[in-house]
Amino acid sequence: MATCTRTGPEQFTVACSTPRGGQSCPPRFARAQASRGAVGKTAHRAISRYIRPLTALGCVAVVLMLGLAQAPGALMGPALAAAPPEAAPAAAPAAPGAPQAPVSAEPTRKQPAGALDRMDDWLDKTKTVAPWLTWGADLRFRNDYSNNNSGLNKELAGHETHQQKYRPRWWATVTPIKDIDLNVRIMWEGRHFSAPDGTADFDHSACLIDNLNLKLTRIGGSPLSLTVGRQDIVLGDGWLVSDGTPIDGTRTAFFDAVRLALDIKDAQTLVDVIYIDQAYSGDRWWATPLHSDHQPLNEQNERGLVLYLTNRSVKNTELNGYYMYKESAFVVRGGDDGHIHTFGGRAAGDLSDHWKYRAEGVHQFGTRNDRCLRAFGVNSALTYLFKDPWNGQVRGQYEFLSGDDPHTRTHEAFVPLWSRWDRWSHILTSTWALETRKYEITNLHRLGPGFACNPTDRLELSGDYYLLFADENSMTGARNRANFSESGGFRGQMIQTQVRYQFTRHLKGRILTEFFFPGNYYTDARNDVATFLRGELYFTW
């Protein structure tokens, strides 16, 4: 296979947009400071850093009060709480191994529909414009605060960040004839920065097409379906295939792909064959009109082939077997060269009425950055369901991702393929950039307990505690000595809690907290506690 010689990797910076004319970015508030006194500067900084976020949080509080006002007994136990104002739509059967949906303790008297419920009904009616056209939209608001996430050192400049993210999306499906759909989705995400000082107040980002595909179902009356174009793909638990655009975080996750699915109903088997052709910038001749900033969405160009089998012939069990091939070509700093073959299997299901499980294992081989690759991974969980009025459950999780042994010429570190996202932690997706690159978690043993419950039909509480270990002390040598120990294998401890509330069918909220306590895998220079807090509102139409 031909090798790629790198002569001066391309540098890419996204922190500051250059003004028209190619001039460098001016210092923040430079002109204002010339005419503003110390009091004026302090007031301006306070408004930017505190008043705007507090206003946003006030809006969240108003929506919360509206939701509680129209949900009598929302803060009581399920046995005392009134039923939701409308009957909930029938839920689709849960995938084996997945937690059960909340169940009401007992039927109660139907309450009069509130204002938000009437809005729900109106929104449902507006979804279908014509028999051949449906549309929809969503709006996600996030208020994120982090401290020491990237460097684990409170003395570093910019260790504290505070930002608000606004992501609206609009989509439509055109069905000119039966079994043929044209799908399009347009998105934009803007970000307002309250901290650190010195950053631009607002990043307008770009408006881009993150879904554009043609879907054919039951082709010629057969069990075949075909989706061609930009689409979202999640396989299994999203452990290996879920996000094709990792650099921009959770703004987008699309794949430029062709997906052929064969549904063999008699055998209760679904066969997916997927071809992926992912450009690092996301620019395509058929998806460029709104993509104005050409911001890279990956560090390399990628091509891949996935064969994924799903079988449900065993009662209360889902079995998966797969082969995945990924070819990468270096483009910007941090990019990969090489090709990776991955064979794996997954099982998930019910052991009894109270016990659920899932387990997945893979073996990888090939080449990565001119080194032979041999890697392994395991991801598993066991859950006990109490079947009580609060739908309580406890779980234990274990994940193993092989690490690179620095004393061999072989690359043994597990490669997460197309799943670089905050699957179980937001903090550590940033912390791992000290070792690999952002969102690429590898070299890990993760184990710990967790719980979840539904005190009311609309409220969900959950929490997890993780002990984290390194499989190898890969970060040895003089250049890493300041950050990583050469013998310590304990990465640290992480605590995560989440509160979710479903205000209506179209509006939900979430509060997420994370704390990471570094262990002896890091040196004293990288040993400060990391914190992440997120408040989120999500409206869908």
Image (spheres, rainbow, N blue to C red):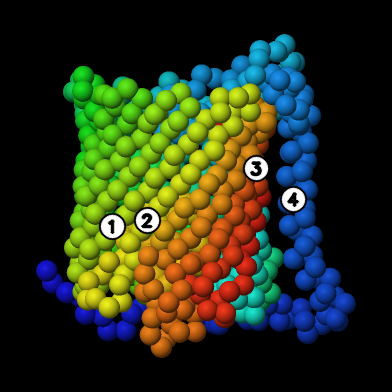
The residue furthest left is 1
Q: Which residue is mark 4?
A: 57
Q: Secondary structure at mark 3?
A: strand
Q: CA distance from mark 2 to mark 1?
A: 8 Å
- Answer with left or right where residue 385 lies relative to residue 157: left
Amino acid type of the residue tagged 4 in the rendering: Leu
Left or right of 187? Residue 202 is right
Residue tagged 2: 400
Image vertical order of residue 285 relative to residue 185, above or below: below
Gap in Å between the C-alphas at discs 3 and 2? 28 Å
Identify the residue under disc 1.
376
Q: Are marks 2 and 1 in contact (CB under 8 Å)?
A: yes
Q: Nearer the viewer, residue 431 or 539?
A: 431
Position of 80 with respect to 140 (left or right) is right
Q: Which residue is mark 3?
A: 499
Please report whichever mark, 3 or 4, sits nearer to the chain's N-terminal start.
4
Q: Are marks 3 and 2 in contact (CB under 8 Å)?
A: no
